[in-house]
Image (cartoon, rainbow, N blue to C red):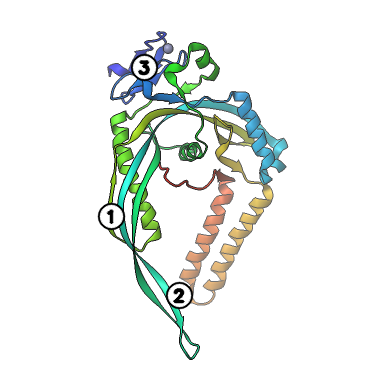
Amino acid sequence: MEALSSKCEGCGAPLEVSPETIVAICPYCGYPNHLSGNLKTENIYIVPTLDKNHIAQAFWKMVDKDFDLKRMKNQLEIVDIEGYYAPYWAGDVHVEGTVRYMVREEECHTDSKGNTHCHTVERHYTESVNETLHLVGSARRQVKSLGVDDMVEHYGKGRPKEVKLLDLDEDGWSKIKLEILNTEMDEVQARLMMHEDAIDVIRNRFDAKSDRIEEFDVRADEPKNVRLVLLPMWTVYYKHENSIFHAVFAGWDGSRVAATEPMPTWRRIQYMSGAVFGILIGAAIGSAGAAGAIIGLVLGSVVAGYFGSKVLEGQRIERGGPFLGGLRR
Ligand SMILES: [Zn+2]
């Protein structure tokens, strides 16, 4: 494939690209090299990052704020800090229409003798939809890694300042430069996905609050304000005893968005007692008879297996806040 070795049009530096690459932003000079597909370079924005030292500080701040990590602070050591910009497509989609749905509700009333009767009724509702969704989705095709979705949520909440990439001069670029992951989805594909996602977001919302959607007549307009946004992501790799863990930080404000964390000894003991408890359930029910033995064994091994696997991993996963309204992908 001819696209596999390429040179920056701005400074001539070699660029690493794949056949899927649509735009490769030069890590040396920041020039956006347009390789294929439909994408206007004036629609590329960047959210400037904090530097490596700030991220290291953010890591230790996170440790101080965490109940478990704080207690093992002396045994923690930063091994490596890696940062890069990941490309996301962002845009606004206006949706409008009507949804009819049914909800089963319990209805109770008390008769003249003071007895309460309850029964289930099907209630029908009609609601109109008329709103603009802000959608954000990864512009890459590879398997998601820890923190990618969490980053999108965090970005949607904070709406950090974006700078047009073409407005950055060489000096501005040199202050915030990091490796940039290649963009693999062009604007035409992004618009199609946003259009579909907008309808899905509304449908999921009504699915969640109804027992049946009876009529769904919602249309999505063409996405507006569509732009490619480069978001800075940092991963701090740190060591505890003989294991490496990592924490992912948003580069613009140093918030921790996701992390794997070592499990302190007392918590390990808690899980271990869970494993013992599981085995005991198995034994107790097992002694109740032959039929009970099978159920008991299955039940016991499920409980023991759940807690047991937590101990084996020796880590827990921490994530950012809850899912946000109109955001997806
Ligand atoms: Zn260059």
Three-letter amino acid code at the position of disc 3? Asn
Toward the viewer: 311 or 69? 69
Coordinates of residue 77 in the picture (x, y in percent): 66, 32
Asked whether mark 3 and ligand 1 are closer than 8 Å, the reply comes as yes
Could you tell me which secondary element the residue under label 1 belongs to? strand
Asked whether mark 2 and ligand 1 are closer than 8 Å, the reply comes as no
Q: In which quarter of the image is the C terminus?
A: top left
Q: Distance between the residues labelled 3 and 2?
A: 68 Å
Kindly identify which residue carries mark 1.
216
Mark 1 Cα shell of 10 Å, populated few (<14), some (14-19), many (≥20): some
Toward the viewer: 56 or 111? 111
Coordinates of residue 109 in the picture (x, y in percent): 45, 81
| Mark earlier in primary sequence (1, 2) | 1
In contact (CB < 8 Å): disc 3 and disc 2: no
Res. 318 image quadrant: top right
Residue 33: which numbered mark, if any? 3
Q: In which quarter of the image is the N terminus?
A: top left
Toward the viewer: 250 or 301? 250
Mark 2 Cα shell of 10 Å, populated few (<14), some (14-19), many (≥20): few
Drawn side of residue 49 relative to residue 53, left or right:
left
Coordinates of residue 267 in the picture (x, y in percent): 65, 51
Indicate which label's residue lies in the foreground, 1 or 3: 1
268 to 221, vertically: above or below: below
Three-letter amino acid code at the position of disc 2? Ala
Drawn side of residue 175 relative to residue 193, left or right:
right
Coordinates of residue 271 in the picture (x, y in percent): 61, 55
Kindly identify which residue carries mark 2.
291
Q: Distance between the residues labelled 1 and 2?
A: 49 Å
Could you tell me which secondary element the residue under label 2 belongs to? helix
Could you tell me which secondary element the residue under label 3 belongs to? strand
